[in-house]
Image (cartoon, coloured by chain):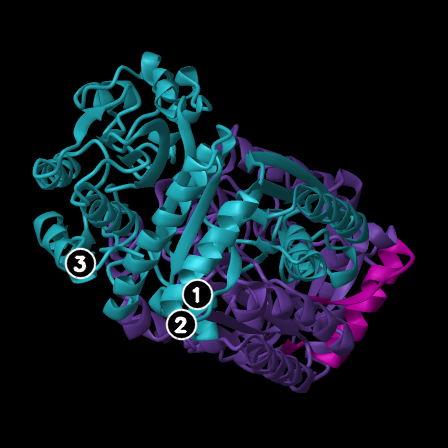
Chain colours: A cyan, B purple
Amino acid sequence: MTHPSAPALRPDRTVAELKELRTLTGTPDGAQRVAFTPTWAAARQWFRDKLAALPVEVHQDAGGNLWATLRGVSDRELLIGGHLDSVPNGGWLDGCLNVVAGLEVLRRLAAAGSPPPVTIRLVDWADEEGARFGRSLFGSSAASGALVPADVRDLTDRDGVRLADAVRNYGIDVERATDARAELAKAAAYLELHIEQGPVLEGLGLPMGVVLGTFGVERHAVTFTGQAAHSGSTPMAVRKDALAGVSKLHLAIRDIAARHGGVCTVGRVTTEPGIVTAVVGQAKMTLDQRHLDPAALAAMYADARSAGERFAAEEKIEVAWDKLWQIQPFPFHPTLIDLADAAVREVCGTSHRLPSGPLHDAAEVCRAGVPTVMLFVQSLRGISHNKIEDTREDHLQLSVRALDRLADKAIAWVAAGG
Amino acid sequence: MTHPSAPALRPDRTVAELKELRTLTGTPDGAQRVAFTPTWAAARQWFRDKLAALPVEVHQDAGGNLWATLRGVSDRELLIGGHLDSVPNGGWLDGCLNVVAGLEVLRRLAAAGSPPPVTIRLVDWADEEGARFGRSLFGSSAASGALVPADVRDLTDRDGVRLADAVRNYGIDVERATDARAELAKAAAYLELHIEQGPVLEGLGLPMGVVLGTFGVERHAVTFTGQAAHSGSTPMAVRKDALAGVSKLHLAIRDIAARHGGVCTVGRVTTEPGIVTAVVGQAKMTLDQRHLDPAALAAMYADARSAGERFAAEEKIEVAWDKLWQIQPFPFHPTLIDLADAAVREVCGTSHRLPSGPLHDAAEVCRAGVPTVMLFVQSLRGISHNKIEDTREDHLQLSVRALDRLADKAIAWVAAGG
């Protein structure tokens, strides 16, 4: 609790500043703060202008992340992070709520009159979305050391521009990006506030929740191969219908998800020859499987593989799996989860613990070994990455208060050696 | 049985002439006799040159069909038909086997020394395949009267050429195409030999079969609409997965086909937004259903509709049906089926009766009320519309003999007032 005479937190200012940013960097189609573009740079300049009024040191690291540091009594650090970048035609809150709310917390702490017990750092991660080059978590994975320059330097955008060339215009040498690891050397805790981007809190009628960690992901392309044949002249009994593998596996992964308590999604199906008068000779599907528990994630994947084999045998077709992407689950820190839960209860009266299906920069910070937790605020209709993404303004204000409470609790925990 | 001194049928000549035509009108990619193109015209000229040696009258009708008429004692007519046109990169037999085998039968009849009891006419239908403008059975539907000029005149090929303009170069006024109905005024029976284009006869180890009729077709596009959602943040229980409608309906139509003894095919599936990280918001599928019996076809369609409604309700999604195409079944003439069966048994020792899944010009002649039957000869691997389409040469020769036997039987039947 802040002293009655201390400067007050102004959650209404956060909402006003989010609208200011929306006006500055949005169009009628939504937010346009795609990383490594002039609009993103304008958002960052707007952020730097806000920071200029505070007694903080500001610099951009080797991975393109922008840091504002408020020196404390101890050089052990509490980090608060978010990302100003958005997808094209994105929402007004995804990523920047975290940054702008963190700015308000920083203001409150900076105005307290005396240095905080530990050093406070607000970070705007570079290119969380990966919207232009397809590589998300660019800046935070540079800081965690997980980024491999050779894997990303030659990625190109739709105009053929290389990632290495695009980031150079924003002061980043991709070959040296992981020098950003130095930024996490003294980090003792990391906090991130984010819109949920899902329907769970709205479904429960709760403004906020505490995130248990980020799901691990197994992402594969599955190809079934049968035999194309004339739809009129080929009796059912002799067909080798590749689509049957997809239909059966799609229905099976829903049971697999339910059995293990994770989520499994078939997002795309394609058919060859793909004409109305031919039995499908080859059918492809994507499979995205997510779980917070590594063993359960592995079991979901194994169950899907064996189901695919079984269906291929039943249908006399063949099946092949190609890995598209994979990441381990990142469970957050138990003590920080408890502190976050207490902060949400103080502000909202009740809390709820839930995993995060989407990835966040918090996963990379967690990977680097920094105790991490996230707060979720309710998303209306569970929709994000779209101009209609929205959250009630009273909920936004509650989320600023909850982040502020959590910051105080985390400062005390870090100061006590946590 | 022909008299020992009568001129002999030469089925080996038919095979040799089919190879001649392949050399003249094919490329390494297959047959290129697409209707209303110079290569098709070259095939027709080759055919006219063959006919020139016979005592037949040759003319092209208002629908673009080419007729060769051998006058008989009676002006009641036995028709034998086929089509020289092919799909692009097509096979060497589809359509032209019928014409070239019919030519051999005509030669045998013309050389008999006296006019046949009834008039014999060999017809090369125009544009059976519809490969260029998407309208199959052009010439035969002009002759049946089913062609509607307003529906086809503005069809365009991939270069934007209108059908009406393309056919004018080949002497056809599309507005008067159905004047070709006059050609069928005295038709008493129609015979067509064709490769099976399916795997049934090969599977049974039989060279030939008798066709019971052409399947009726119900062809629809089915659209399921749910709600796109993030694959990570949306719990399974709250999803509205449009793809579930497709997967369930695809598996259900296989049972529906088996229950009614028809064929049902899902040939194409598309997904929106169609990305690996999103639950499918809208899924579309094509459904092609075929049966020889109109009531069974209607029941298969009704069953699919009600299954679609049930699955939409189960999945809390919506379903919409759009008719793509529809044609009634055309059962062939029972007496001609019996005659065809006898002819096949005489030549091959054994016969088999089967429906035709693909459509043929015979369906249009049948629609016009002319007693009709078809013979099928085995297709290797059941493949057609492809350069690897093939039939054993001994089977091709058997098929010429069977058509010849059937012609004699049908002449006797027509002469007797059938």
Numbered label tally: 3
Q: Nearer the viewer, mark 2 or mark 1?
A: 1
Same chain letter for marks 2 and 3: no
Read off the residue under disc 3: A10
Q: Which residues are magenta?
A: B330-356
Q: Residues within 10 Å of mark 1 (few under 14, many from 20)?
A: some
Q: Chain of mark 2?
A: B
Above or below residue A44? Residue A255 is below
Residue type at numbered disc 3: Arg
Q: Residue at x 64, y 53 (%)?
A: A246
Disc 2 from disc 3: Cα separation: 86 Å
Front position in the image: A288 or A336: A336
Q: Quadrant of the C terminus of chain B?
A: bottom right
Read off the residue under disc 1: A345
Read off the residue under disc 2: B180
Can residue B339 be found in the magenta stretch? Answer: yes
Q: Is residue B126 visible?
A: no
Judge left or right: residue B26 versus residue A309: left
Same chain letter for marks 2 and 1: no
Above or below residue A384? Residue A119 is above
